[in-house]
Amino acid sequence: MERIRKGEVRALARAISVIEDSAPESTALLKSLFAHSGKARVIGLTGAPGAGKSTLVDHLAREYRKQEKTVGIVAVDPTSPYTGGAILGDRIRMQAHHADPGIYIRSMATRGFLGGLARTTNDVATALDASGKDIILIETVGVGQDEVDIVRLADITVVILVPGMGDDVQTIKAGIMEIADIFVINKSDREGADRVEREIRAMQTLAIRKDQWTPPIVKTVASEGKGITDLAAVISNYEKFLQQKNLLLKKKISNWQERLVEMLRDALLDRLINERMQKGDVARLAADVAEHRRDPYSLVEEIVNTYTGLGDRGIG
Amino acid sequence: MERIRKGEVRALARAISVIEDSAPESTALLKSLFAHSGKARVIGLTGAPGAGKSTLVDHLAREYRKQEKTVGIVAVDPTSPYTGGAILGDRIRMQAHHADPGIYIRSMATRGFLGGLARTTNDVATALDASGKDIILIETVGVGQDEVDIVRLADITVVILVPGMGDDVQTIKAGIMEIADIFVINKSDREGADRVEREIRAMQTLAIRKDQWTPPIVKTVASEGKGITDLAAVISNYEKFLQQKNLLLKKKISNWQERLVEMLRDALLDRLINERMQKGDVARLAADVAEHRRDPYSLVEEIVNTYTGLGDRGIG
């Protein structure tokens, strides 16, 4: 813990691996990490594949370094033609910041997490927070519900669009527009940037947010570093807005509500399967269902009633 | 039930709405639907946005109609530049088959499902199965884990690729190649179709499937109806392969294993939150965590111990 809190890269990397692997010691580790967390600002950035997220995030990180803030980056990208791309990209990006101990980048593999990708990503963010990073940037591709959940649970959510992508290709998930606190139009030197801006504006006239905030639109050309200072300023404005209206705590409470429910769901299942039922029980019951000897809906009720104390006549 | 089993469209549509909404009567409904299900072959089709899935699925449905088989289609598409596209597309597609009562198409909204998209989709497939459809086609965009889970749980999984999309844009999820029983290269009159085929072949030399099946590659031009008969034949071949090797039941058992676990997870949480805890409990505890008065990891253990009988000293 001491070494993580001092920001030692190796200790931090090992802690994150323990969290990713759901190793037996991970709960104890997370408890102590949590005690030292809560100071960082978590910014989630998402957008279509090819929107230039990594480049934008790298430049934004440099901008924060100029402001003497330390930065942790968590990159989650489940889309890739085949596998392996993310890990390679990670190494290349690490090299670009190699000389700077104030930036730490971690790519997340995206499969096989007990407890889901969103929860693991948040736990990794807690580790970065505890290691003393001032700003945590979480980037994901905005294509699946998992990815939307990840950035939705950040303090501030940035949605990145690009001009010139047809309806077919601008494959962001329906509903992602609604989670944006700030819009970025990246590659804004391309034709069509104004059209994207008009579309966002048109959408905004349809729905007014409960908090009365109108998500501003920042135009950037991340590859040339253009617009990054503006973006940092707009993020800072929104942060001030949240603080003035006392909304940051409110948002954190509603985020924790969701996270607690997820954690409970996993903890209950884990106890049932691993401590109450016998190994092979589920496989045997699945065979009963597959061969239509039992219906799965009654079966689930029966298991809950028999094994847990959460049954209708349970003793809970 | 009688009206659903006779294949009456209105009864079926209402049943599906009850399932989608997780209405109180949905469990009872699903129990009786399950009793009449188990005859249909479920085929999952997935691919990148813009791969021409709907067109392909529509033509495949027509092919099955020629073989005098009835067809149910479940279309799940969470990606869309803004909202509304799926519903519109659904109506247009329904019209194309309007005269034919042997085809039923249903688009799924993709948000806000209790119990997850994959589970709801499977339950809808059960309803179509009980209504007497011989073939159920489930189509999804292969971008998020949810979507991959949906087609992975079909009897037969078809992955649709297209030539000429850069690495950046061929945004299928890493790992999706591995779930294919059959590959389709759609729009195969475009340049690059051979390159895609070579890439699939190259990948296949790296990993041999446990069941020794080498997923065949079918080239189609769905918009012109080309290659659809081939695709139906290849699907039928794979079905025979599964039956000869007695693999269909094996696959169904392993699918039900996953589905049962998901159902248990949701049922346990539902009982805990709605029957054991008080309304507002979670919100109050979330505030404690957000203000760092408690750590969430210990809290979850405590709740499980206190409320469920699944605790370490529980009475289960």
Image (cartoon, coloured by chain):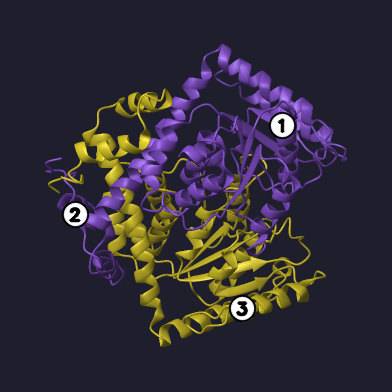
Chain colours: A purple, B yellow
B174 and A58: which is toward the camera = A58
Three-letter code, disc 2: Glu
Q: Secondary structure at mark 1?
A: helix
Q: Name the image quarter holding residue A236.
A: top right
Q: Secondary structure at mark 3?
A: helix
Please give the name of the residue rendered at 76% of the width and 28% of the height, measured from the top-left corner: A218
Q: Is circle 1 on the same chain as circle 2?
A: yes
Give the position of the N terminus of chain A as an image quadrant. Answer: top left
Please give the name of the residue rendered at 46% of the width and 43% of the height, measured from the top-left corner: A119
Q: CA distance from mark 1 to mark 2?
A: 57 Å
Residue A106 circle label: none
For the question of whether residue A212 can be seen, the reply is: no
Three-letter code, disc 1: Arg
Residue A38 x, y percent position in the rendering: 49, 28
B31 and A100: which is toward the camera = A100
Q: Name the image quarter holding residue B61.
A: bottom right
Q: Nearer the viewer, mark 1 or mark 2?
A: 1
**Crowd band around label 3 with a 10 angstrom C-alpha radius: few (<14), some (14–19), many (20+):** few
> Residue at label 3?
B206
Question: Are discs 1 and 2 less than 8 Å apart at CB?
Answer: no
Is B37 placed left or right of A125 in the picture? left
Q: The numbered mark 3 sits on a residue in which chain?
A: B
Q: The numbered mark 2 sits on a residue in which chain?
A: A
Is A31 placed left or right of A118 in the picture? left
Residue A302 circle label: 2
Residue A65 circle label: 1
Residue B20 x, y percent position in the rendering: 41, 46
Give the position of the C terminus of chain A as an image quadrant. Answer: top left
